[in-house]
Amino acid sequence: MASQSPSESPSQSTSGSASESPSVSTSEHASQSVFQRILDPANRADPYRLYHELREVPVRREADGTYVVSTYREIVELLHDPRVSSDRRNLARPYGADALADAMPALAFIGLDPPEHDRLRRLAMRHFGPPHTPYRVESLLPEMSAMVTGLVDGLAGRHRADIVDDVAYPLPVTVICRLLGVPREDEPRFHAWADAIVETLGPGEEDRAERERARLETTLHLRDYLQELVAAHRRDPGDDLLSGLATYEGPDGAMAPADVVATAGLLLIAGHETTVNLIANGMLTLLRHPELLKRLRGEPDLVVRFVEELLRYEPPVQFLPQRVALADIELAGTTITAGSPVVLALASGSRDPAHIPDPDVFDPDRPYTEHLGFGGGVHYCFGAPLARLEAQLALRELAGRLRAPRLVADPPPYRPSATLRGPRHLLVDYDGVDPASP
Amino acid sequence: MSGEGPVRVLIDLTRCQGYGQCAFLAPDVFTMHGDEAVLYDPDPDDAQRERVLRAAAACPVQALHVDRMAMRHRTASGPATRDGAAFRRDGRIVIVGASLAGARAAAVLRREGFTGSLTVIGDEPHPPYDRPPLSKRVLSGGVPAEHTLLPRLREEIGAEWLLGTAATGLDLAARRVRLADGREVGFDRVLIATGTRARPWPDPAEAALRGVHVLRTMEDAAGLREALAAGPRRVLVIGGGFTGSEVASVCRDLDLPVTLVERGPSPLSGALGGVLGEVAAGLQRAHGVDLRCGVTVTSLEGDADGRLRRAHLSDGGTVDAEVAVVALGAVRNVEWLRGSGLAAGVWGVACDAGCRAVDANGLVTDDVFVAGDIARFPHPVFQYQFMSLEHWGNAVDQAEIAAHNMVSDQTRRWPHLSLPVFWSTQFGVNIKSVGVPTFADEIVVTQGSVAERRFVAVYGHRGRITAAVTFDQGMWLEFYRRLIERAAPFPPDFPHVDRREDPRPVPAGAPERIVAAAGATVVVTGHDPSERRASLAPGR
């Protein structure tokens, strides 16, 4: 439809709905690629129908030189392709914001390649999970469970709640603060920075320089804050992750102070800007599928597969916006040229009908749910186990205790970011709150 | 979902990429050993069920099976002819061999819609079990040997299981399998999946000494576990292949002194060539193994009570040891096929790429199929060389192909074209391989660092990539598999991340017994078994 010029045959046009002004919207469509339309905030509530169109060309070159990859198999291939870098300093000119790159504080491992990525990630993993700290996440379970119960208790005595502000946001923030050793009361300070950084993630190259500038400014504030905090943990270490990062030295050496700060910043932002969307998307999906809401009340273990299907169907991370091809890469009939930016459309890949039958049906009973919700390869989401457990606990509690919950607005208002996509508010009306099960 | 009886767990370690999500979510059941290798209890306590289900749901490559082992590839569309449909409905199939390949084939036959009579014959008394854990967590005492039973196969499949009864003969004309107890079982089609057994120590008297072990079966593993738990002063491992090296690794984990004697220049060199053999040797020495290469054990000496006390070596040396593990490879179980008219011998049972057995004349049979360790089949990617692959993944893949072909008409049959993949966990390192590393003349380390023992090594044969081996870098393996399938040029000539070693290839040091025939370069396309096809590439 996008390629059809408005003058050609207006009588055949099916794209304009009654409420749109045909002349404006069609000409906009004609100049906008499907990918640009996906990024358009107007389409935030439902990008999925546009992904159908996006996948018609699995590897698509945008006008700004970005290659967008949208089919499951091709995305998985690139996630495991050593010719694909996560370090944007590898971009060929004119994409690179070289001057800014020098001014940026140390990159966290999400923007680095092996071996540096692997070394820093191992050093961070040492204090978070297996093989060295396998029980850390499990040991947080009772505390997380109590937090969830407390948050849902807080919904009692009224009949309307904003699931985002009342549950989906406070839970992951409290958990990540506890885990990292960041004072919970500092939340208003770093929340503003985190939100600002999320809005600079892209994808897209045209306004890249501007976004990088905005990002740099915010990153420096965050860095100053974390530097001070890390210094305090170094002086007086606790059982938290920041203390571990700041004080540990082992076979991989120690983390340089600048890397500790960068890693802390990454975990703080990623740890609370993504799970909020998973929980909010989950509640939205439940309310749109009343039969599942009902089932979940009687069958609480269903939440495990429910969250897995959610990661496939409504993932909080829609794109990996900043990969770079190091070589010419032949993929699905297209050559991605060396030095080009590459966007992996994870959310589209997880709904690829060539990968999974009936991809637009939400079905937690699928025998296998292989999805791209947490990416894949060496950059697979560091905090995935935490995100899964938080979402499972929160959704089980909400489904089990809210009496007759219903959406106030469908679709709800969305946050602007196309990459970390989720509702800004999720207003729900309900008849009451059942007491917590003992 | 909770409280439904015992939990059975199986990880398809061919698929596993070491994401560690299971070890986060059920840390009492799944343990990361080093960066990438996962060890687990296949039969965990019922109380773990909820955690295990969480772990299974979270596996990023869905390699973790609970209670059942399903398949991902498409089902066949059904037979085209009336005869085919009739056979599928009420034919008689006998599977000889009740280990991984036999059990897998039985499950696939049912899934493909075969409703006729299905009989599985096995010489061991146990239901099918999983062998890889035997040389790892079972030996280290992490899990009892009997925990390795494969997930609920018997209940699921609906077959007659004749266990503890070896097959002793195959009469193709009468279409009957003879059993050791005198019974005979008739069939319309038969699958041969009798696998291999451990190669025994050649001197029977020395082999009978107390303290001399082999490692193949559940009983072997339980017996060796007991011997290691008793804290012997030294363990001697004879043979430095994968089994021997894994046993030595477990001994070091248990802090037992161990001497490993390998006839070749280094451990693993028979499978991975001399270059990586040296890396493996360094790994063993760094973990305190007393490694003796280029040496053989000439005799084992017992004391007056018939207990092992010493081994004599070809270099004149001796090793005092109370336990010896004979890890000299496997012998194929073909004796029962003597006189059957099939092309069966020490090399295995020859078959075509569709798993149909070849008779002694070289003719392909219609109703006799072969799968698993015992099958010897031509692999188009490796110049149609006949190979038998003693790998877990091959048993699974080939059994699926064989089972599909047994109930499919000629035009719907699939070729067995999957590339060989295997893994080994030793000394905290996860080693994975794709392709055939011995089918190579040169090797180059593309990614990572040999000194760190985290790297990808790529093998080339006459200018094309034929194999890749990773040490704790398994997430990259699929990329190299595709290069092999595309007959990509060697050495790889593209820029990529983590290039730290010299980009110039060196001789791979593959053992000489593999002499490649000149000629064919084959390209494989397709992902699902139903789509996979080989085609000859024009000469390069």
Image (cartoon, rainbow, N blue to C red):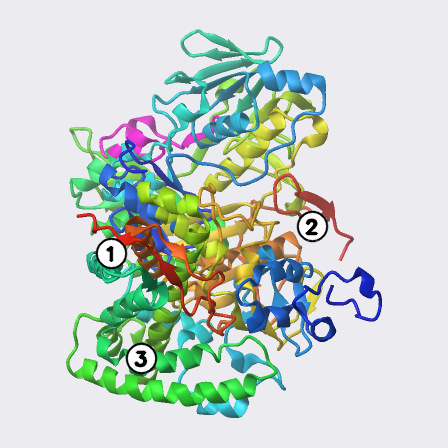
Magenta region: B193-222
Q: Position of residue B120 (x, y in %)?
A: 46, 20
Could you say which disc has been placed on residue A179 in the image?
none
In the rendered image, the vertical position of residue A56 relative to residue B528, given as above or below: below
In the rendered image, the vertical position of residue B304 relative to residue B278, given as above or below: above
In the rendered image, the vertical position of residue A63 relative to residue A220, given as above or below: above
Name the quadrant containing residue A266.
bottom left
Name the quadrant containing residue A328.
bottom right
CA separation, marks 3 and 2? Answer: 47 Å
Q: Nearer the viewer, residue A155 or A118?
A: A155
B200 falls in the magenta region? yes
Chain to which mark 1 belongs = A
Residue at numbered disc 3:
A260
Q: Is residue A124 left or right of residue A332?
A: left
Sequence order check, earlier mark of 1 and 3: 1
Q: Which element carries disc 2, helix, strand or loop? A: strand
Q: Is residue B198 left or right of residue B338?
A: left
Residue at numbered disc 1:
A138
For the residues carrying marks 1 and 3, which lies nearer the camera in this image?
1
Chain to which mark 2 belongs = B
Q: Disc 3 marks which amino acid?
A: Val
Q: Is residue A285 left or right of residue A42?
A: left
Q: Are marks 3 and 2 on the same chain?
A: no
Residue at numbered disc 2:
B523
Q: Nearer the viewer, residue B301 or A273?
A: A273
Name the quadrant containing residue A246.
bottom left
Q: Position of residue A267 (x, y in %)?
A: 34, 72
Q: Are marks 1 and 2 in contact (CB under 8 Å)?
A: no
Circle 3 residues within 10 Å: few <14, some 14–19, many ≥20: many
